[in-house]
């Protein structure tokens, strides 16, 4: 009996040690990467781009819904990283910093557009065109089109959310960030993120209910 108890304690201790070692190693690796970037290492910058180009592009795309534009914005993100890495605050994770720049670049772009052009980017037609190119056919064209239309309606509703709600919802739903990570990116509290997400979901529910009431009667 006592042997099983000691064995369980040893298991927990081993798991804890492995977890702490992995966490510390990751932090040290990130610190080394930042140091190399600050020393203008081309290899380090190439590594950073390879590691984060996917998530950065995805974040930009969720805001602007245009692949070419998202690609341009992603390039701007890494250009800013290259130019300002020496001012990077090492208390933050580099991924948090990248998400923050990606969000700011995307929001700044949208702010510069007039209202007509802004919502044109999020129109169901433009979203459907992009989805037609990149969503695989599931063997039933009718069902595939229905799914794309539903996604287009949701995208249009997300685009109409207030700016802070849109940021929080996008980072949560599409980038799968935790509340704490979203709070770090948005430079706010976890409770504020929870409130933003709650209001975003309520607004989306209201918008979608209104849409289906108007179009199903």
Image: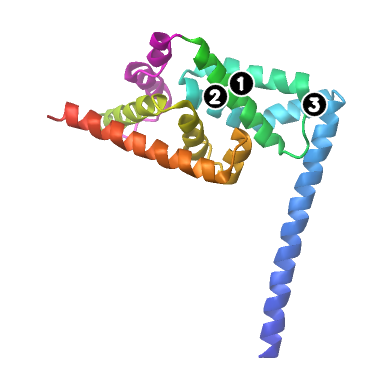
Give how far across and how far down residue 131 sits, in percent.
Answer: 39, 24
Mark 1 element type: helix
Q: Which secondary structure type mostly characterizes the magenta part of the structure?
A: helix
Residue designated by label 2: 60
Q: Which label's residue is closer to the chain start, 2 or 1?
A: 2
Tell me if 75 is positioned left or right of 132 in this view: right
Mark pair 3, 1: CA separation: 20 Å
- Side (left or right) of 178 relative to 33: left
Q: CA distance from mark 3 to mark 2?
A: 23 Å
Q: Position of residue 32 (x, y in %)?
A: 83, 38
- Do tag 3 and tag 2 residues touch (Cβ < 8 Å)? no
Question: Is residue 130 found inside the magenta-colored segment of the image?
Answer: yes
Give the camera-side residue of 179 and 10.
179
Q: Which mark lies nearer to you, 3 or 2?
A: 3
Name which residue lies at 25% across and 35% down: 209
Q: What span is colored magenta in the figure?
A: 114-140
In the rendered image, the quadrant that contains the C terminus is top left
Of the numbered discs 3 and 1, the one sitting upstream in the chain is 1
- The residue identified by callout 3 is 87
Q: Position of residue 201 (x, y in %)?
A: 38, 39
User: Residue tagged by mark 1?
Assistant: 74
Crowd class of label 3 (few under 14; some 14 to 19; many from 20; radius 10 Å) = few
Mark closest to the chain's N terminus, 3 or 2: 2
Q: Is residue 18 magenta?
A: no
- The answer to whether residue 92 is above or below residue 119 is below
Badge number at residue 4: none
Decide: marks 2, 1 in contact (CB < 8 A)?
yes
Marks 1 and 3: in contact by CB < 8 Å? no
Mark 1: give few (<14), some (14-19) or many (20+) Cα within 10 Å.
Answer: many
The crowd level at tag 2 (other Cα within 10 Å; few <14, some 14-19, many 20+) is: many
Instruction: Locate residue 50: give its quadrant.
Output: top right
């Amino acid at each position: 009996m006592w042997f099983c108890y000691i064995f369980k304690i040893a298991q927990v201790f081993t798991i804890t040690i492995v977890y702490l070692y992995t966490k510390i190693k990751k932090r040290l690796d990130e610190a080394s990467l930042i140091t190399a970037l600050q020393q203008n290492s081309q290899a380090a910058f190439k590594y950073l781009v390879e590691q984060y180009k996917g998530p950065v592009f995805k974040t930009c795309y969720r805001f602007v819904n245009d692949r070419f534009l998202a690609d341009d914005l992603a390039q701007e993100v890494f250009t800013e990283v290259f130019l300002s890495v020496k001012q990077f605050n090492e208390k933050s994770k580099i991924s948090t910093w990248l998400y923050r720049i990606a969000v700011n670049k995307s929001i700044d772009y949208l702010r510069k557009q007039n209202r007509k052009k802004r919502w044109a980017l999020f129109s169901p037609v433009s979203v459907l065109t992009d989805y037609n190119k990149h969503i695989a056919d599931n063997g039933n064209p009718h069902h595939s089109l229905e799914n794309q239309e539903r996604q287009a309606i949701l995208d249009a509703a997300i685009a109409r959310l207030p700016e802070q709600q849109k940021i929080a919802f996008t980072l949560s739903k599409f980038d799968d960030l935790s509340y704490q990570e979203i709070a770090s990116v948005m430079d706010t509290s976890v409770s504020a993120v929870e409130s933003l997400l709650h209001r975003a979901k309520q607004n989306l529910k209201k918008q979608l209910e209104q849409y289906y009431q108007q179009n199903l009667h």
